[in-house]
Amino acid sequence: MQKITIKNSKGQNIAAVVHSREGETRKLAILCPGFLDSKDYHHLAGLGEALAKEGYTAVRFDPTGTWESEGDISEYNTTQYLQDIKSVKAYMFEEQKYDHLLMVGHSRGGRVSLIYSANDPEVSKVVGIMPSAISTPRDSAKQRRNDKWKEEGKMTSKRDVPGNEKEVREFTVPYSFLEDSMKYDTFEEASKIHVPILLITGEKDTIIPPEEVKEIYSNANEPKKFVIIPGIGHDYRHNLGEVEIVNKVIVDYLKSLK
């Protein structure tokens, strides 16, 4: 495991971690965290290790404006996130030539992985773990949250610090984040992807319900696979046993495609 920094499209440093095994590999995996999540949360760190054992070089990163990456939180939006993925890919391809690119993300990270994959012909496979679909909420509670967000112009959200769940970090996200997010429709983008897609949902996920992920799946092209994992919710990262279950589903799927 190696910590690195990568310049984003604005010349700012993106903090990243690379997992690899000894020997040459031609497979690269880019791991994308969810909304305000850290690259260092257990589910992405564990997945990076699991993929490295399968012969991938796996890189996870903090998007611009979050955690260890430079930039202001006002720069943390979907458009910049997609640019960050481009920057990460370009850096890794400069270091070594890869002929296989896997995109993986959880929640919002799954959403941007799908959007990015729809627009980069070099992507070989994509995995969406509980990916969010569209920014327009389908229930009244989320709509009230967004209305308040718009009225106040900002929303404060807390995240636990990696390695110390009792400590939290606050992020105050401007409403412009949501305005930018609404430019992208995951359903439409999924319909443009023509490489293998794995979509994973948790039976107990109340943040991104299984039916929302299933709808993304319905819009995707073959070859595709949809997996509901029993007993798991959206924040499965807090349970190492559940992290292993999700990672095994991903690894087994990748092996099945060989």
Image: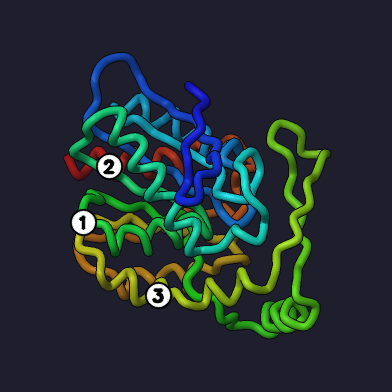
Q: CA distance from mark 1 to mark 2?
A: 19 Å
Q: CA distance from mark 2 to mark 3?
A: 22 Å
Q: Nearer the viewer, residue 210 or 186?
A: 186
SS type, badge 2: helix
> Is label 1 or label 3 in front?
1
The C terminus - image quarter: top left
- Which numbered tag is attached to residue 215? 3
Residue wearing tag 1: 121
Tell whether 54 sits left or right of 113.
Answer: left
Query: Please, what is the three-letter code of the amino acid marked with disc 1?
Result: Pro
Q: In this image, 104 relative to 61: left or right?
A: left
Is residue 254 shown to the viewer in this render?
A: yes
User: Would you name the residue on which mark 2 appears?
Assistant: 254
Up-down relation of residue 230 to residue 96 (above or below):
below
Q: Of label 1 and label 3, which has the lower sequence position?
A: 1
- Of the pair 143 and 223, the residue shown nearer to us: 143
CA gap, disc 1 and disc 3: 23 Å
1 or 2: mark nearer the eye = 1
Q: Residue at x 23, y 55 (%)?
A: 196
Q: Residue at x 67, y 53 (%)?
A: 72
Of mark 2 and mark 3, the one earlier in the sequence is 3
